[in-house]
Image (tube, rainbow, N blue to C red):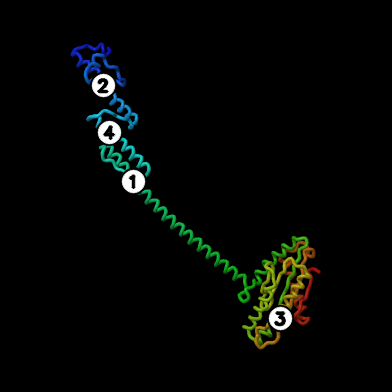
């Protein structure tokens, strides 16, 4: 039954009540009966209710920007609700941007829920901050410990290297010792064997009349004489040459990649350079001199299957024999021999 077909029990009043009920309960806005349209103030009341329905519908869809024109108590209530919800939305955005100091005091239960939420977020943020500080502090401490460990490891490596070098060096002259020479020179000989035209020279060097010098001027002067000889020889050598104290006043020198003729010239230069140095003994007019036995080594002359260590021992024996010849011939001279001649 339509509005116009409704029974007219009480006349226009009953018709008005039924229309307003349908207007409020129905999602649609039915047209007003002609009888009601003629009533004074009806159109204004109808428009008021229709707009109230529209703004409530907009609120239900999340649209709080709807402009509501009617005034009065209901209009004021609607506008207050609209303003509060829009302000709450602004505060939610502020919280999303990190402002956890926001608080709501104007929407009752919703305010309580909002405030509990922001307080909980603030507490969790503070907990995260504290954890981050703890983590940062732990990271600093760990980095400090790592740095200390690295420094200790570096110091340990330096100490180990220092002691290793000490174990390889002669304490008086700072030259490599006999053990280091044998180890390194044997590798050089092994490498020389694999070369088609590999060659080197091995020199045995001895300070002439050193025992007499020591007995005459004392061990301190003797040590000074050894230092004069070693420093003089060192100044003329290449970095690749292996120079070591063999024992007492004897020294050994390996000139890698050096043919016999050039090795002989170098040995002679060393002999002359030492003889030109002033004696460390103040009341001695005699210069310090050295005798040198030189053994030339060429890869083509080596016996097949000989190890580098064996070649080294053979060359040392030949150089030592040549040194003996130099001393027998009057000292302060160079005697030369070729390995496996």
- Residue 330 is situated, as x and y percent measured from the top left of the image, at 77, 82
Tell me where residue 325 appears, x and y as whole percent.
77, 78
Give the number of the mark in front: 2 or 3. Answer: 2
Mark sitting earlier along the chain (4/3): 4
- CA–CA distance between discs 4 and 2? 22 Å
CA–CA distance in space, label 4 to label 3: 112 Å
Q: Name the residue under label 2.
A: 46
**Mark closer to the observer (1, 4):** 4
Of the residues under marks 1 and 2, which one precedes in the sequence? 2
SS class of the residue under badge 3?
A: loop
What residue did someone put label 4 on? 81
Residue 276, disc: 3
Distance CA(mark 3)–CA(mark 1):
89 Å
Label drawn at residue 122: 1
Residue 210, relative to residue 94: is it above or below?
A: below
Q: Which of the two residues, 245 or 56, is positioned nearer the viewer here?
A: 56
- Please name whichever residue, 188 or 6, is drawn nearer the observer in this view of the structure: 6
Q: How crowded is mark 3: few (under 14 residues within 10 Å), some or many (20 or more)?
A: few
Residue 178 horizontal/vertical position (percent): 66, 72
């Amino acid at each position: 039954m339509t509005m116009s077909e409704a029974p007219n029990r009480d006349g226009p009043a009953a018709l008005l009540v039924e229309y307003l009920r349908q207007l409020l309960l129905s999602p649609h806005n039915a047209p007003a009966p002609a009888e009601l349209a003629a009533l004074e103030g009806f159109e204004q009341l109808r428009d008021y209710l229709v707009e109230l329905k529209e703004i409530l519908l907009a609120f239900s869809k999340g649209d709080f920007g709807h402009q509501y024109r009617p005034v009065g108590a209901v209009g004021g209530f609607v506008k207050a609700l609209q303003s509060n919800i829009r302000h709450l939305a602004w505060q939610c955005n502020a919280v999303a941007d990190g402002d956890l100091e926001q608080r709501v005091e104007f929407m009752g239960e919703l305010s309580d829920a909002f405030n509990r939420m922001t307080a909980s977020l603030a507490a969790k943020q503070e907990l995260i901050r504290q954890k981050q500080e703890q983590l940062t502090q732990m990271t600093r401490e760990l980095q400090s410990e790592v740095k200390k460990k690295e420094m200790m490891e570096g110091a340990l490596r330096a100490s180990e290297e220092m002691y290793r070098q000490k174990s390889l060096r002669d304490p008086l002259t700072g030259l490599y010792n006999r053990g280091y020479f044998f180890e390194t020179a044997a590798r050089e000989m092994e490498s020389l064997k694999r070369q088609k035209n590999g060659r080197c020279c091995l020199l045995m060097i001895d300070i002439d009349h050193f025992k007499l010098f020591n007995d005459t001027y004392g061990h301190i002067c003797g040590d000074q004489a050894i230092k004069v000889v070693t420093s003089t020889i060192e100044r003329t050598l290449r970095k690749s040459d292996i120079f070591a104290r063999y024992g007492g006043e004897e020294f050994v020198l390996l000139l890698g990649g050096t043919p016999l003729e050039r090795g002989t010239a170098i040995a002679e230069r060393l002999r002359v350079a030492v003889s030109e140095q002033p004696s460390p003994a103040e009341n001695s007019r005699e210069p310090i001199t050295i005798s040198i036995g030189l053994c030339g080594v060429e890869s083509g002359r080596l016996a097949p299957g000989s190890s580098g260590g064996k070649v080294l021992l053979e060359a040392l024996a030949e150089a030592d024999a040549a040194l003996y010849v130099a001393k027998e011939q009057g000292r302060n001279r160079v005697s030369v021999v070729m390995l496996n001649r």
